[in-house]
Each structure stands twice: as C-alpha cells, then as structure tokens.
Amino acid sequence: MAKEKGEVKTVALNRKARHDYFIAETLEAGMSLTGAEIKSIRAGRVNLRDSYVIIKGREAWLVGTHISPYPQARNKPDPKRTRRLLLNRKEINRLAGQVKQKGFTIIPLRLYLKDSWAKLEIGLARGKREYDKRAAIAEREAKLEIEKGLAEKRKRRSR
C-alpha cells in the first residue's frame, strides 16, 4: 500500500491546552530531531503536557516536551532536552512581537507526521481564567443535554 502525499498521522495531542488557553492562531513548525527521537515519535512515545515555546535570539525553541528514549538506540539524548523549531524569520518575528504583548504565550497543540516529517502545530494562546473554564464546561454540558433530548425525541417518533 503506497502512502499518499500529504498524509497526516497525529502522534500526540495536548488536550489540556484548549482547556487552559484561548487559541488566537495556529502555525505549523518543523522540528530539529535526532534519529532516535524520530523513531520514538513514530512509536508514539511523546508527551506534550507542560511544554511551551520560547523565542531566544532569532530562533524558536520547544521546552519541556518529553520524548522517551528509543530502546534500541546507542546514544540516547535527554528526553526533556530543548529542541529547535524550524520556522520562517517572518513567523518568528511576528510571534515574538505577539508574545511581548501582555498575556500571550506559545504552546504546542499537536505533534504529527506529515509525509514522514515530524511537524508540530503551535498556537499563540492567552490563558483562561477560572470562570472562563467553568463557562466552557457549562456550554459543553448544555450542548450534550440538547443532543440527548433530540436523540430521545427522534427515538419516540420512530416508534
């Protein structure tokens, strides 16, 4: 079975990110990895929780992502090492300008394989307050109740 061009396989999601932050915009970034790290990523041994992106100098760096060591590798890099992100100069400058504004941060949302390349979806985010989180939960529960009611109504009609 041949792989199609543009095929995307999600490896890791940062589920907590959308709960804790408002995502203003998203970008796709490449990553600078070692051979053992890419093999671990393909095996799905990645954790994006508690990771973030910093801009130091003229480069973007991914901090706090845990990529478990590949068991068969000879030289195993530190699982939590800081990794360089591959972005355009314009993208880095724009993100740096946004981060300098109060309340914005850059967080990884999703790690995926696209045409055998590891890509990271990063988001420019602003933190939610506790009452924002409660409102989002209440909205989600209300939608669920409406769906349940509609399903029950359809069920009664079909009898």
Image (cartoon, helix red, strand yellow):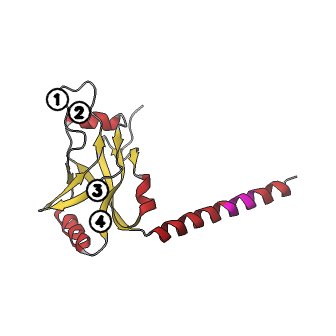
Residue 70 pos. (x, y %): 27, 30
Between the C-alphas of marks 1 and 3, the distance is: 26 Å
Q: Which mark is residue 84?
A: none
Between the C-alphas of marks 1 and 4, the distance is: 33 Å
Residue 131 pos. (x, y %): 49, 71
Q: Residue at x 21, y 34 (%)?
A: 35
Residue farthest toward the left in the current orientation of the protein: 57
The residues colored magenta run 145-151
Asked whether, in this view, residue 159 is left or right of residue 47, the answer is right
Q: Are marks 3 and 4 in contact (CB under 8 Å)?
A: yes
Residue beneath disc 1? 75
Q: Are marks 2 and 1 in contact (CB under 8 Å)?
A: yes
Residue beneath disc 4? 105
Q: Nearer the viewer, mark 3 or mark 2?
A: 3
Residue farthest toward the front in the current orientation of the protein: 130
Q: How many marks?
A: 4
Q: Quadrant of residue 127?
A: bottom left
Considering only order in the chain, which callout, 4 or 1, is on the residue closer to the N terminus?
A: 1
Q: Residue at x 26, y 72 (%)?
A: 98
Considering only order in the chain, which callout, 4 or 3, is on the residue closer to the N terminus?
A: 3
Residue beneath disc 3? 52
Residue beneath disc 2? 36
| Prevalent SS, magenta region | helix
Asked whether, in this view, residue 34 is left or right of residue 118, the answer is left
For badge 4, the amino acid type reads Thr
Camera-side residue of 7 and 12? 12
Q: Residue at x 46, y 68 (%)?
A: 130
Between the C-alphas of marks 3 and 4, the distance is: 8 Å
**Quadrant the N terminus occupies:** top left
Q: Nearer the viewer, mark 2 or mark 1?
A: 1
Q: Are marks 3 and 2 in contact (CB under 8 Å)?
A: no
Residue farthest toward the right in the current orientation of the protein: 159
